[in-house]
Image (tube, helix red, strand yellow):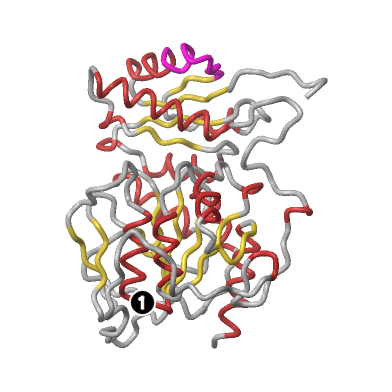
């Protein structure tokens, strides 16, 4: 560590409410975070963000009832900084406000660590040494053959009729993978989808931690450079090859044996929405060995339980390599389950998926 000087985290704050900007700036500065820019959501802020290494992260706080979709799409497209979206509705007051403040600050520190001069910030482009060769399908990381998963201990019992009742409608996806993501997820998933060729025999469900009001913007951003249609959640939609359907935030995802999507009650467990675990478990229940999962950048361990269920059902689990993540907690937690067969950056994951599907075509 000699010759390197610790410096405070630097944040850009964008909020459409002057009192809220003042409140958030005070909260950040009291925690030792330097607010280098505090602005309303105006187009000129986009140019400021592109002026070199000005900050470590961007905190976005907007009223979901007055969202400017064009500004948000441009922000996610052009911002070189990892973006944390603040859910203003959860702030409350008293004890609730205190818990919200603690969680927000924990997320911020998790996004930007390490913040030391001379060390790369999480989310920086991986070095060549981080690249991994594409393993043969069915191998675990490091080239070891995959062990049978049937005896894996789970926190829940899988339905014995898993995938047995599947009676897909014509045009429904025969293979479905879950993409689980949180902080840094939109950037990573966008890179992954942009690297995939068209016409792969696979459909995706994306469980991205985000506010419900941001789902249409997320779909627009991810669709821009991808060969895949990225669609907001919609009940009775048929899940097809060549599509990415976003998991609902205010409801739980349900899948019919026909391949159609339905909504259930709001998830009851976990802090984050949508629950990556619950989406993975539902896809595993329906598709069995014809499912899979990739865990991308994110804070926390949501998805770890679901990865074990996917593997127990006969599916495949991969994860984004830590050096390419804004925050690697989620993929690291997935790797900690022992069921992850392959890790790479988003482009490497895409290349491996193409090879995997070619073997099974």
Q: Is residue 227 magenta?
A: no
Q: Is residue 118 in view from this perspective?
A: yes
Inspect this view and state whether residue 193 appears.
no
Residue at x-position 47% and y-position 56%: 222
- Label 1 secondary element: helix
Q: Considering depth in this image, is 356 or 351 the residue closer to the camera?
A: 356
Identify the residue shown where x is 43% and y is 63%: 308
The image quadrant that residue 3 belongs to is top right
Crowding at dot 1, Cα within 10 Å, few <14 / some 14-19 / many 20+, comes out as many
x, y (%) of residue 31?
A: 48, 15
Q: Residue furthest left?
A: 265
Q: Position of residue 285 (x, y in %)?
A: 31, 72
87 over 102 or under it: above or below: below
Q: Quadrant of the N terminus?
A: top right
Name the residue rendered at 44%, 27% in the picture: 14
Q: Quadrant for the C terminus, please.
A: bottom right
**Image spot of residue 159 (x, y percent):** 27, 74
Query: Which residue is rendered at x = 54% and y = 33% of the image?
Result: 46
Q: Say left or right for 143 vs 254.
A: right
Magenta range is 26-36
Q: Quadrant of residue 121?
A: top right
Q: Nearer the viewer, residue 2 or 174?
A: 2
Q: Which residue is mark 1?
A: 287
């Amino acid at each position: 560590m000699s010759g390197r000087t610790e410096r405070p985290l630097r944040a850009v704050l964008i909020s459409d409410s002057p009192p809220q900007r003042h409140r958030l700036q005070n909260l950040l500065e009291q925690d030792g975070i330097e607010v280098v820019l505090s602005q309303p959501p105006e187009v000129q802020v986009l140019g400021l963000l592109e002026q070199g290494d000005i900050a470590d992260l961007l905190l976005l706080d907007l009223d979901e009832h007055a969202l400017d979709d064009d500004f948000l799409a441009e922000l996610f497209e052009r911002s070189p900084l990892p973006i944390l979206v603040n859910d203003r509705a959860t702030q409350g007051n008293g004890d609730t406000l205190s818990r919200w403040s603690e969680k927000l600050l924990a997320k911020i520190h998790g996004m930007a660590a390490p913040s030391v001069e001379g060390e790369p910030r999480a989310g920086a482009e991986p070095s060549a040494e981080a690249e991994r060769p594409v393993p043969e399908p069915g191998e675990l990381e490091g080239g070891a053959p995959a062990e049978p998963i049937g005896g894996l201990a789970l926190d829940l019992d899988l339905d014995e009729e898993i995938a047995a009742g599947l009676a897909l409608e014509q045009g429904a996806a025969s293979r479905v993978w879950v993409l689980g993501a949180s902080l840094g997820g939109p950037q990573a998933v966008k890179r992954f989808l942009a690297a995939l060729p068209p016409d792969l025999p696979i459909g995706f469900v994306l469980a991205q931690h985000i506010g419900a009001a941001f789902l249409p913007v997320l779909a627009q951003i991810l669709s821009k450079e991808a060969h895949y249609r990225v669609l907001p959640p919609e009940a009775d939609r048929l899940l097809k090859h060549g599509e990415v359907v976003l998991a609902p935030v205010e409801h739980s995802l349900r899948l019919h044996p026909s391949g159609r999507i339905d909504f259930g009650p709001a998830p009851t467990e976990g802090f984050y929405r949508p629950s990556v675990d619950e989406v993975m478990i539902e896809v595993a229940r329906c598709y069995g060995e014809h499912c899979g999962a990739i865990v991308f950048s994110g804070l926390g361990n949501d998805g770890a339980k679901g990865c074990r269920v996917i593997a127990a059902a006969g599916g495949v689990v991969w994860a984004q390599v830590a050096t390419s993540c804004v925050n690697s907690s989620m993929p690291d937690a997935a790797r900690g389950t022992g069921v992850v067969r392959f890790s790479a950056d988003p482009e490497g994951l895409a290349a491996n998926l193409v090879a995997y599907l070619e073997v099974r075509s």
